[in-house]
Image (spheres, helix red, strand yellow):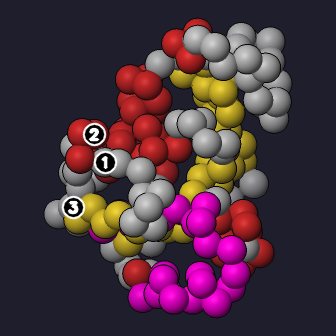
Amino acid sequence: MATQVFTTHSAEETVALGRSLAAMLAPPKLVLLRGDLGAGKTTLVKGIAEAFHAASAEEVTSPTFTLIHEYRGPEVNLYHIDLYRIDTPRELETLGLDDLIADNSILLIEWGEKFERFERERDVEIALVRVLNHDDKLDEPARSSKNNSDNYRRIRVITP
């Protein structure tokens, strides 16, 4: 497995990183997006969706309440999935995620680590962590969030 680590300093930079990461996400792919609430997962997806001409950044929103957002591009279908509110394998099964897997699909799954299946089946893992300065470690969350504009995001991408 190869690991790359990036640092972004704003939402705009995180969107731009998403655009550049799209090159390594040729379908079919199952991508786990890890990070606490507010870490920037949906912000990163905005750039990925733009890169595949599936949606503009403004059209991409968090699927927290709808669970799945579908963005159709000319060649790629993106499925942004949020499993935060899904707690059991039975609830997961009712979503029909297997029906979304196709040669032209990319599944971007938030909170997929809750289910062992996605740990095994993932093609790429992207972990996002908010940090206060460049000395903070990737796996340590920001110690204070009083001023989010001062926070950086460390983004670790793991690929086969």
Q: Nearer the viewer, residue 19 or 11?
A: 11
Residue 143: x %, y % from top left: 79, 20
**Quadrant of the image containing the C terminus:** bottom right
Please report contact status of discs 3 and 2: CB closer than 8 Å, yes or no.
no
Please report contact status of discs 2 and 1: CB closer than 8 Å, yes or no.
yes
Residue 42 lies in what quarter of the image? top left
Mark closer to the observer (1, 3)? 1
Structural distance between the alpha carbons of marks 1 and 3: 13 Å
Q: Is mark 1 on a helix, strand or loop?
A: loop
Question: In this rendering, is residue 117 above or below 157?
Answer: below
Ranked by sequence position, the earlier of labels 1 and 3 is: 1
Q: Nearer the viewer, residue 92 or 72?
A: 92
Taking the spot 42% from the left edge, 51% from the top edge, the residue there is 62
Q: Which of 3 and 32 is in front in this view?
A: 32
Mark closer to the observer (3, 2)? 2
Task: Provide the residue designation for mark 2.
Answer: 57
Q: Let me know if residue 48 appears in the view.
A: no
Task: Provide the residue designation for mark 1.
Answer: 60
Q: How crowded is mark 3: few (under 14 residues within 10 Å), some or many (20 or more)?
A: some
In the picture as drawn, the residue positioned furthest to the left comes out as: 74
Q: Answer with left or right where residue 14 lies relative to residue 33.
A: left
Question: In this rendering, is residue 43 above or below 2?
Answer: above
Q: Answer with left or right where residue 118 lies relative to residue 72.
A: right
Residue 19: x %, y % from top left: 37, 39
Taking the spot 39% from the left edge, 30% from the top edge, the residue there is 16
Which amino acid type is marked by label 1?
Answer: Val
Residue 150: give its label: none
Which amino acid type is marked by label 3?
Answer: Gly
Q: Let me know if residue 127 appears in the view.
A: yes
Task: Provide the residue designation for mark 3.
Answer: 73
Question: In this rendering, is residue 142 above or below 115?
Answer: above
Residue 41 shown in magenta: no
